Image: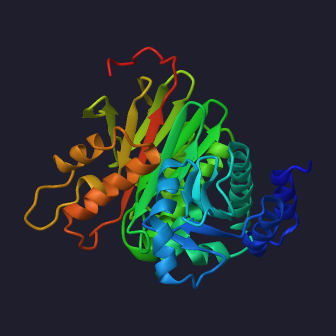
């Protein structure tokens, strides 16, 4: 018997990058007997899932399936929705290496058995990988994701991101930028290499395109050092020198650089400015106290030191920019004084991918849904290893 998921995989490889949804539609109809499929992609703020095949999907029909699709997206598990006439819609998560892209809906003539659900899940996995690769070749899926026009600065920031989440055997990492459509300088970056995870969070200075350009230069300088085998210190120092010799101290970037040994639970850090790091352990949120060094680019030939601390299995680390912890709506105390810790505690039963959204939603609510006054970035790292390193420095 032919392998249905293999047939879909071959069809996706043969399809042009802008026709992946159509290729999946034709093949899934043939090999699974589906009456229709739809590919939904998540928008930049993760507030909705939007159709690719039928961009003009009638609002009523779209809203009718939105709740089920969102349940699939959030749980990252298949969800079956049976109709009274016997037909069944299967919703499958579209995810690549933990990057949540959207949901695949497959409408079948009857409720599927376990083997068919597993096949559909494999199809969704193949489609997700293809969609992620196709983003470099076509704008179609990016157009489907955006609910309004991005500013030039935001366009650059989203293109610079490595992704919005990644899942590894020992950790889960997720991040979110706000305001999604106008973000300027705040940013995050990461790279996975064997047992080493490198994460950087940047608290960009300035506004608009100038802030985005400065952040892009900083991120690429750190990537250049990292990809050449440079340590955290070398990444910080190359970026700092690059910024200084470009701007002669008039511009600088507050940055936190982290390197996690994902087997031992040992974290090495260079704190070059204002991003704050907090740990959620059990139901308690505590700040991780690091020696704060000069922001990148403030002075020529600035040298940086590494600090170390350990994490325990089940620990959750949050890194937030000053647009989060220092947010101070009129007449209120800063969000970081108490409200931020409450929001972080409320995420303890959520995956990291949902936790960043919870903290951001609470931040928006704290502003009474007014526009954020500053860029904001939240990064959440869960370490689930089983052999933590010795606690360094008593932390």
Q: Which of the 4 quarters of the picture holds residue 347?
A: top left
Q: Residue at x 48, y 38 (%)?
A: 258
Q: Residue at (59%, 47%) from the top-left corner?
A: 98
- Residue pushed farthest front? 85
Q: Is 372 located above or below residue 325 in the figure?
A: below
Query: Is residue 204 found left or right of 197 in the rendered image?
Result: left
- The answer, for residue 60, to whether it is visible in the render is yes
**Closer to us: 9 or 271:** 9
Q: Residue at x 43, y 54 (%)?
A: 202
Residue 304 in sight:
no
Left or right for 122, reference 266: right
Front in this rendered view, residue 32 or 18: 32
- Residue 156: give x, y in percent of width and height: 54, 70
User: Which residue is drawn at the image coordinates 23% and 55% (left, top)?
Assistant: 326
In which quadrant is the C terminus drawn?
A: top left
Q: Is residue 262 left or right of residue 180?
A: right
Identify the image quadrant of residue 114. Answer: top right
What color scheme is it? rainbow
Residue 104 against residue 210 in the figure, above or below: above
Residue sticking out furthest to the left: 331
């Amino acid at each position: 018997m032919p392998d249905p998921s293999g047939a879909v995989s071959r069809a996706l490889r043969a399809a042009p990058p802008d026709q992946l949804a159509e290729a999946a539609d034709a093949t899934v109809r043939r090999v699974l007997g589906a009456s229709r499929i739809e590919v939904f992609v998540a928008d930049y703020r993760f507030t909705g899932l939007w159709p690719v095949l039928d961009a003009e999907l009638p609002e009523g029909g779209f809203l009718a399936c939105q709740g089920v699709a969102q349940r699939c997206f959030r749980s990252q598990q298949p969800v079956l929705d049976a109709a009274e006439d016997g037909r069944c819609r299967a919703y499958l998560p579209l995810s690549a290496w933990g990057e949540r892209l959207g949901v695949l809906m497959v409408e079948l003539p009857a409720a599927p058995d376990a083997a068919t659900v597993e096949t559909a899940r494999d199809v969704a996995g193949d489609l997700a990988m293809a969609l992620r690769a196709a983003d470099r070749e076509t704008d179609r899926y990016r157009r489907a994701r955006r609910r309004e026009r991005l500013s030039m600065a935001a366009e650059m920031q989203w293109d610079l991101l490595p992704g919005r989440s990644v899942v590894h055997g020992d950790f889960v990492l997720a991040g979110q930028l706000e305001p999604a459509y106008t973000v300027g300088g705040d940013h995050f970056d990461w790279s996975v290499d064997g047992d080493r995870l490198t994460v950087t969070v940047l608290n960009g200075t300035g506004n608009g395109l100038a802030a985005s350009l400065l952040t892009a230069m900083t991120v690429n300088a750190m990537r250049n050092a990292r990809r050449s085998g440079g340590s955290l210190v070398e990444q910080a120092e190359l970026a700092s020198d690059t910024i200084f010799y470009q701007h002669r101290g008039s511009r600088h970037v507050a940055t936190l650089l982290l390197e996690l040994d994902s087997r031992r639970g040992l974290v090495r850090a260079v704190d070059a400015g204002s991003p704050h790091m907090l740990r959620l352990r059990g139901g308690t949120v505590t700040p991780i106290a690091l020696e704060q060094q000069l922001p990148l680019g403030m002075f020529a030939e600035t040298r940086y030191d590494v600090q170390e601390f350990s994490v325990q299995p089940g620990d959750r680390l949050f890194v937030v920019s000053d647009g989060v912890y220092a947010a101070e709506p009129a007449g209120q105390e800063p969000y970081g004084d108490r409200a931020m810790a409450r929001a972080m505690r409320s995420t303890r039963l959520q995956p990291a991918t949902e936790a960043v959204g919870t903290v951001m939603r609470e931040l928006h609510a704290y502003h009474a849904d007014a526009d954020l006054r500053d860029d904001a970035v939240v990064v959440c790292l869960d370490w689930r290893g089983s052999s933590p390193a010795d606690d360094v420095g008593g932390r």
